[in-house]
Image (tube, coloured by chain):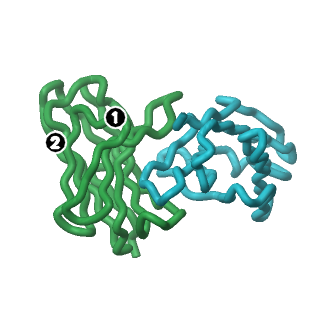
Chain colours: A cyan, B green
Amino acid sequence: QQQVKQSPQSLIVQKGGIPIINCAYENTAFDYFPWYQQFPGKGPALLIAIRPDVSEKKEGRFTISFNKSAKQFSLHIMDSQPGDSATYFCAARVQGGSEKLVFGKGTKLTVNP
Amino acid sequence: NAGVTQTPKFQVLKTGQSMTLQCAQDMNHEYMSWYRQDPGMGLRLIHYSVGAGITDQGEVPNGYNVSRSTTEDFPLRLLSAAPSQTSVYFCASRRDMDAYEQYFGPGTRLTVT
């Protein structure tokens, strides 16, 4: 009930491609869906986030698409660059301000030059 | 503003040894938490704190203790290290229970032999 399932586990694209990372959840009490970006040797950092009353959010080259009825959300990276190579985590927070932020298992993205 | 800081960056322990991982934040955040990151497992919550003097268990608390005597500091204690505790440990904080953005420290890579 608390899980967030993330796929794929790894992804390789060419520069300029549009990698898509998908996440699915079951718990309808989730009220906030952030994506975190983690570079090797660093801690995760918030990249972009969406609330379930919005179907899409764009910030620069990063877009979250949210499908409430399917309980799925995805991250799209437009015009991907080698500098985007990192591990990406989707997450979901339980409604009511609980501390419990549930993370997906991560997707290692490699963007080849 | 240093954000969330962690020490040490690397540590090697022998089985049965004890140690404390340090975490501090200078953002006056109420919420602090500890995660461990293992390959293919994502980020798993160990313990968290909603304020000074208040702590609670997360998903994987066994073998770890925490305390929160000040707002700024949230140390994680390994009582008797085991090889299964080999991992990368991240401390995180956020403003309060209603805040959305969580800030992560740079991590401590722990190896238990």
Q: Nearer the viewer, residue A11 or B92?
A: B92
- For label 2, the SS is strand
Classify B52 as above or below A16: below
The residue located at (63%, 51%) in the rendering is A35
| Label 1 vs 2, first from the N-terminus | 2
B54 on left or right of A52: left
Kindly identify which residue carries mark 1: B60
B12 on left or right of B91: left
- For label 1, the SS is loop
A92 on left or right of B54: right
Kindly identify which residue carries mark 2: B19
Kind of residue indicated by mark 1: Val
Across and down, in percent, residue A60 comes to 78, 64
The residue located at (35%, 42%) in the rendering is B58
- Give the Cα separation between the discs numbered 1 and 2: 18 Å
Classify B110 as above or below B21: above
Q: Quadrant of the C terminus of chain B?
A: top left
Query: How many C-alpha atoms fall within 10 Å of the one at disc 2: few (<14), some, or many (≥20)?
Result: some
- Tag of residue A55: none
Q: Quadrant of the N terminus of chain B?
A: bottom left
Camera-near label (1 vs 2) is: 1
Query: How many C-alpha atoms fall within 10 Å of the one at disc 1: few (<14), some, or many (≥20)?
Result: few
Kind of residue indicated by mark 2: Met
Q: Are marks 1 and 2 on the same chain?
A: yes
Across and down, in percent, residue A75 comes to 74, 47
Q: Nearer the viewer, residue B56 or B8?
A: B56
A28 on left or right of B103: right
Give me the chain letter of mark 2.
B
Q: Nearer the viewer, residue A25 or B88?
A: A25
The residue located at (23%, 58%) in the rendering is B54
